[in-house]
Amino acid sequence: MSASSLIAIVEDDVAIREALADLMEVFGFEARAFDSGEAFLSVHAPGLFGCLITDLNLKGESGLQLQRRLRAVEPSLPVIVISAQPDSSARAMALASGALAYLTKPINDQVLLAHLTQALGRNTPRA
Amino acid sequence: MPLRPLTPEASQGRPAAAYWQFDLTDAWELLDASVTRGGPGWAKDGLERFLARVRIVGISEAALLLFDLPWDRAGVMGRPLGSLWPEAGLATLSDLLASLAKAQTDTVLTRQIDDMGHLADVVLMGWRPAEAAGPGLAIVSIQATLDTGAALLAVGAGPARPRSLISSLPVPLWDVDARAAGRVFERLRADGVSDLDDYLSRRPDLIDIACEIVVVTDANRDALALMGAADVSELQRPVSYLFALARDAARRIMLAHFAGERNHVEQAKIRTLDGRVRDVLLLVTFPVPGEQLDTTLIMMIDNTDALEAEARLRQIQADFSHAARLSTLGQMTASIAHEIKQPLSAILTNAETSLRWLAKDDPNLPKVTQLAERIAAGAQRASDIIARIQDMAGKRQPRHAPLDLNEVVLESVDFVRHDSSEKSIRISLDPADERLATVGERIQLQQVVVNLLINAAQALEGVAPAAREIQVTTSREEPGSVAFSIRDTGPGIPPDDLDRIFGGFFSTKAGGMGIGLTICQSIVAAHGGTITATSPSGGGAQFRVVLPARPQA
């Protein structure tokens, strides 16, 4: 459970990044989108975000590396990993690194909403 | 009338006599107006039809020598008369035979021929002996003068001719007596024929006749082995058996002989005595004046296996080229699946978001409009990717088209970018800041770039992740060339290998087929370009492809 309801989106594919940001908007969540883990970390401060949605296959540092670095600074931040790879080893590694969920693309909005709700500790989103 | 054949000894160099025996039984029925015009002269095709029905049933040794026939007496039986008699004498002989058929038995008829091949002052005397078994038997005796005494002597020396050195040579060799063909050529020249090619087009039967009158006199052990013969006598026959599958070769050999060439070489197929078909390199050496004129040499080099191997290799290369393309495709499948899921994912999310907006009491219609536009764009992107894969997988004819090498290289880098980033490989791009116009097959050139990038990535496997880098550069070259190079920070290529890596089946990888670079090279070569590999002083390996620039309009 997190005090903040601001959601961070890290995704290097611009179309998906915009789509996720729009989805957050219609969900009624505040969201900030980043095109890399580095960009996110440069803004990140403990408590600022209520949840991180990150792509696994980022051009620079991978989602997995981001997850590990984040664990050092804010281990309690819920992380939802999204990926185009359905393979179980990537899923296992993400979950072993503390991810709340591992969702494969294309993402089902209901499932994502359920995980976000769980991450933010709220039964329903605002609005 | 008693038959008194003369011996060759008695006729040597002097007016010679000889006789032939013919069976006219089958030709009898043709002796009417349909083949003759009632007097001298033959109706159209009449002569040929008549001759085809006349069978040779006997010949004297003297006639064999006089007519310079390479067979023994039994060997002549049953052969077409047209292949044995000089053409100049055929009409006269036929007239004689036709007249004999109509005349009483034992009536002697004579004909004269001034010039008949190498025989001059020819007198034919014919009769049908009353005491013969059937009325169809006709005997024709010949008296003639040889135009050169030497010709007869050479014939006489034939059987005793010492075996030449061909027997000791370790390649299949045939010793051939082609003088009969030479005489045919002389006669044709005398008749004003200068273009044998044209003549053979009108008289193709002359090729078959030549194959019957040119005769193998000797063959060596390797020739026996090649032909599957047990004894040389099996090969001492008219050369027709050598040209059963290569009539065109026989024709070209005749043209070369007629033109007075020394040698003729060509690739041909032969059928062996035991029915196998072999590919051979056929070499014919004709004698020139001063040499033994009866010695034309035919050599055959059996290169069936080499040709088969070459054909197999070509097939393998074609198969591999396709397999390698599919394998390249396989290696890219992860990238492609990833690439295609991205737009699909965005489309789905945008659609879901749109539906959520539309379900609200206060739908954000401008937002929904924007989302719909993004859905359309995403669908287009997915469709483009699929088209690109279809291009890549399709085994279609190359289509050369103007293209920008910059674009080709950058697109190809996109194919492997995902795979590379997973392997912590940084790809740095240094493209030329202008269009690099060239002409080529986009997919093939992409295959080259992708293959080289995959090679580079593989070279980086043993390198610390932080140091894994591939530098991709495109540039304009002077004069009139465009180029790209792909350099990795791997261990480089050992100097000894630099020359071999394009050679095919060269691989440093345990499971590698070693054909990637060969295919790259053949594609680049097909585009009129070059590909080189170097180990630059800074380390790593560099592959550089230079292609002709497309002239700017």
Image (cartoon, coloured by chain):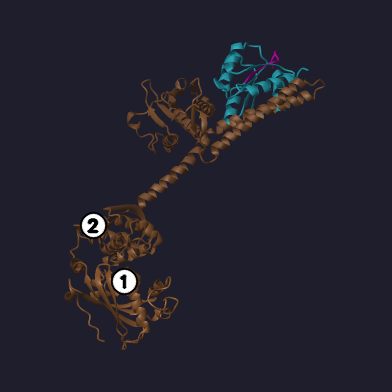
Residue A5 on the magenta segment = yes
Q: Quadrant of the N terminus of chain B?
A: bottom left
Residue B287, picture quadrant? bottom left
Viewer-closest of B290 and B501: B290
Residue B199 on the magenta segment = no
Q: Which residues are magenta?
A: A1-10
Q: Identify the chain drawn in cyan.
A: A
Q: Is residue B536 visible?
A: yes
Q: Is residue B129 left or right of residue B457?
A: left
Q: Write the residue at 20% across / 66% down.
A: B148
* Percent of width and height locating residue B473: 46, 23
Q: Secondary structure at mark 1?
A: helix
Mark 2 surroundings: few (<14), some (14-19) or many (≥20) residues within 10 A: many
Q: Is residue B319 above or below residue B171?
A: above
Give the CA distance from mark 2 to mark 1: 27 Å
What residue sits right under mark 1 in the picture?
A: B89
Q: Is residue A87 visible?
A: no
The colour assigned to chain B within the rendered structure: brown
Residue that extends furthest to the right in the rendered view of this protein? B361
Q: Which three-letter amino acid code belongs to the residue tagged 1? A: Gly
What residue sits right under mark 2 in the picture?
A: B287
Same subunit under labels 2 and 1? yes
Q: Label 1 marks which chain's residue?
A: B
Q: Earlier in the sequence, mark 2 or mark 1?
A: 1
Q: Is residue A16 above or below residue B188?
A: above
Give the number of callouts. Answer: 2
